[in-house]
Amino acid sequence: MMNATATSTYPAGLRLRRVPVATGLAAVSAARAEVCRIVSAWHVPVDPDAVALLTSELVTNAIRHEASPAVRVAVRCSSGQLRVEVHDSSRDMPAPADAPADSENGRGLIIVAALADEWGFYPTPRGKAVYFTLVFQGR
């Protein structure tokens, strides 16, 4: 007999949460924790470690180039994938750096490109958004 609470819980339809994140020393860990909490609460079938790392990379880049006191993170599930967007007020579009192997900085977007199923960016009326997607596992 199947337990009713143990059935598949793939997110149905579109789910969206927007989270403001104050820039500062705790911004990256706060954003990462909130995105991971949302993904867990929605029972999204993606690798939580990948979600945490990719969110950290995008938020780190945003706060490095952000002049305003907050960035915004949007978490969305639809069409069999998770999409996380980080919005900031910078008009500078990201580009993967050609960082030396021993550099402590400059490889974030290379990591994002390697782990995400898709990533990209687009201008917004207030600056830009950078995003990654992960396709649901086990589908």
Image: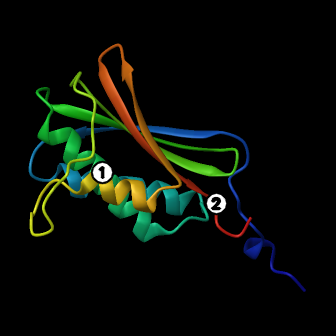
Q: Which residue was labeled with disc 2?
A: 136
Q: Residue furthest top?
A: 125
Whether residue 47 sits left or right of residue 85 in the image: it is right
Q: Which residue was labeled with disc 1?
A: 109
Q: Residue 35 at x, y = what percent?
A: 40, 53
What residue is shown at x 22% (from left), y 53% (from top)? 28
Local secondary structure at mark 1: helix
Is 119 drawn above or below residue 36 in the view shown?
above
Could you tell me which quadrant the C terminus lies in? bottom right
Q: Residue 2 at x, y = what percent?
A: 86, 81
Q: Please tell me which of labels 1 and 2 falls first in the chain.
A: 1
Front in this rendered view, residue 116 or 75: 116
Determine which quarter of the picture holds residue 30.
bottom left
What residue is shown at x 74% (from left), y 76% (from top)? 6
Q: Residue 55 at x, y = what percent?
A: 34, 53
Q: Residues within 10 Å of mark 2 (few under 14, many from 20)?
A: some
Is 113 drawn above or below residue 73 in the view shown?
below
Could you tell me which quadrant the N terminus lies in? bottom right
